[in-house]
Image (tube, rainbow, N blue to C red):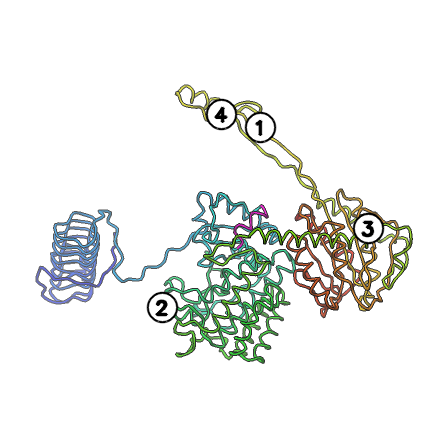
Amino acid sequence: MTAHIVAAPTTATAPATAPATAPATAPATAPATAPATAPATAPATAPATAPATAPATAPATAPATAPATAPATAPATAPATAPATAPATAPATAPATAPATAPATAPATAPATAPATAPATGTGTAAPAPGAAVPAPAAVAGAGLRGAWLPLSAAFTDAVADLTDRQDLTVQCAPGLGQGAPGCFMPALATIELDGTHLRHRPETCDPTRPADRYRYPVLWGVLVHEAAHATHTRWTPPTTLTGAPAAAIDAALALEESRIEAAQIRRRPADRPWLRAAASSLVLADFFSPTGTSSPATPPGATPTSASGTPATGSGSPSGKAPAGAGVGAAAGMSTPGAAMTPWNAGYAAALLLARTDAGILTSAETAKLREVIVEVLGESRLSALSALWHIAHTTCDTDGEAMLDLGRRWCRIIGTRPDQPVPVPPPGTPGASGDPSPLVKAIGETLIAVHNASDTPATAPGTAADPATPTDRREERRQEKQARDQAQRAARRVFAPSTTPTTRRGPTTITGTRPPQPAEQAAARRLARQLRAAAHRDRVTTRTTSATPPGRLSMRGALAADAQRAAGTTPTAQPFTQTIRRHVPTPPLRIGIACDVSGSMNAFAGPVASAAWIIARAAGHVPDAVSASVIFGARVRALTRPGHTPAQVPEFAATDPCEDFTTALDALDAALELTRPGAARLLVIVSDGKFKDPHPTLGQQRLDRLTTAGCAVLWLAPDRHATVLNGAHRLTLTDPAQTADTIGAAATHALRNA
């Protein structure tokens, strides 16, 4: 066995005639520079594999009468500071594999006749030298999945397919996973790791495949949604640097990536916004003022976690897996700093993570107002405006355009005043927050955290705090408000969809100008969409196998023999030889589609395509079991184009010339007529508008959309151009060609039904 060299020589018990600095291959009476294989009479500071009469610091291959600086393989009578494989008569400071007659300061593997300062194991395993750096063991992916964490990880894996539309992802959840972050995504392994310490429940009691169960651990589910956004929309890999620490431009690009992928996620899945808020309020924001300990040698401060294959892992929280400058400096120095220093870099870092999330629709401007004031004090309005332009560009950048993101990172550094190719600058002494004192930046972030946490649309609590129990008064108030909203929606639906024998829809400023026969292309599109909806609604039969000790079921002879053997042995039979297979049909989920079209003057180009799309959707829904659609136009009044449960024979036509828009009444009418806020069906609301509403419709309309998205209704907003205003919670889709309206709505309806 080869032992480690320990530089701690002891007193020799045999004379030495001359020093030796290298091993010797033959007897020497002078300095030896080569290892000796025969007895040596010099001191030894390295392990010996046989008795030695003098300390040796290097291996000896022949007798020597002078000290040796390498391990000796021959007897020695002097102390050894490294493990020996043969008896020694001198003290040893490392494990020995043979008896020793001198004190030992490390475990010995054989009996010792002298005092020992470390326990003797008798195994022959050498211990590392005191004070030596020991590399951290490499984490094995999935090594912590034991017991109930394994089925929980399988349940997360099933659930993540709906979040990403990918079938190749694997989720592993257990305490200690996540590469040091609450969660991380490793592209090379197609694996998402979650730190199970944030579950705060027994894993066997959790079932993330049930939507209602996710409210018990909203923080961890929010982290999974965040990592799912990375898995879907981060299709580029940041480059590595020669020094190992990421350059400032890479850090800036990764900070911009955080809000970019979340903006893309809620455009694709608006219902994920509350979960992303939960992760931001409890984990991402807290990263700014959580104490940072001494960094591990295996992961230097600022290093990005990597997967087993060396691919950078995208973690939640700080984009590069590190705290802002100021906190990272303290960590490197072995001190704890609770806040970020008031430097331009840290102010820009906070803006990239928080203010950019505001423009992405995750947070609100009211929640980050105080933080913006503090950032303006550090950067100024002009620099903050320039940074804001960069993250708006990032939000429209393609998922695969990594070079564009890195270019934005370099431009970010030039605006801040930092060299893009160098690591993040160290805060100068005297900067507020650099020495550990809470800075105004940290206080503003704390206020933002409290505001997000207290918001009604954040289903989470801050780390270490318990949720405030809802009082009976609060519950009664919530029920009263919900009942009031439902009553208001019912009144709007009765006004809009009420049957009438008089042509009242042709009166007033918002009119249905007439009807026309459907064209052959529209009829073919309706049939094609009906086939797609039926295919999306199809569900395979579910097979369940159960075992029992008695019939019914198929008898297994192996189980029957096992039961007989257990009875013969006098034990209670536990074998279950009968197996029963039950196959049951999964009911087709209902489908509800509502279309609301703006008929103000700016939407005139969409009048014909929307009328055609409304007829195609209503016609296709009539051929799909339990599918209902309705469509309205809203201007100065709200009129019904197609009615729930009615398959129109003619295509209605209308003009878009109204001076204003009654947006809220249109939403209320569709909500009540189609029960868009009631769970149990695939629900889709399509809004065709430029969003240029007059007060109070933007505020009231946002309240309606929040209620719909909270209930799980998908909202698709078809905008005529990139200058359109889209309310928060809706998935924006710009249609430059109005003729694509029907195909776009049909694809969205098929997707909603498939994922129901």
- Number of residues whose C-alpha sits closer than 10 Å to that of mark 3, classed few (under 14), some (14–19) or many (20 or more): many
| Residue named by callout 2 | 335
In the image, residue 213 lies in the stretch drawn in magenta: yes
Q: Single out the mark in the foreground, 4 or 3.
A: 3
| Residue named by callout 1 | 580
Tell me the element at label 2.
loop
| Residue named by callout 3 | 643
- Number of residues whose C-alpha sits closer than 10 Å to that of mark 4, classed few (under 14), some (14–19) or many (20 or more): some
Q: Real-space Cα distance between discs 2 and 1?
A: 63 Å
Tag 2: residue type?
Met
Tag 4: residue type?
Gly
Q: Real-space Cα distance between discs 3 and 1?
A: 47 Å
Q: Nearer the viewer, residue 56 or 608?
A: 608
Proximity of marks 2 and 1: CB atoms separated by less than 8 Å: no
Tag 1: residue type?
Gln
- Number of residues whose C-alpha sits closer than 10 Å to that of mark 2, classed few (under 14), some (14–19) or many (20 or more): some
Q: Real-space Cα distance between discs 1 and 4?
A: 14 Å
Tell me the element at label 4.
helix
Q: Single out the mark in the foreground, 2 or 1.
A: 2
Q: Single out the mark in the foreground, 2 or 3.
A: 3
Q: Which residue is at a point 62% across and 54% down the rendered structure image?
A: 477
Q: Real-space Cα distance between discs 2 and 3?
A: 68 Å
| Residue named by callout 4 | 559
- Residue lying furthest front in this view? 473
Q: Single out the mark in the foreground, 4 or 2.
A: 2
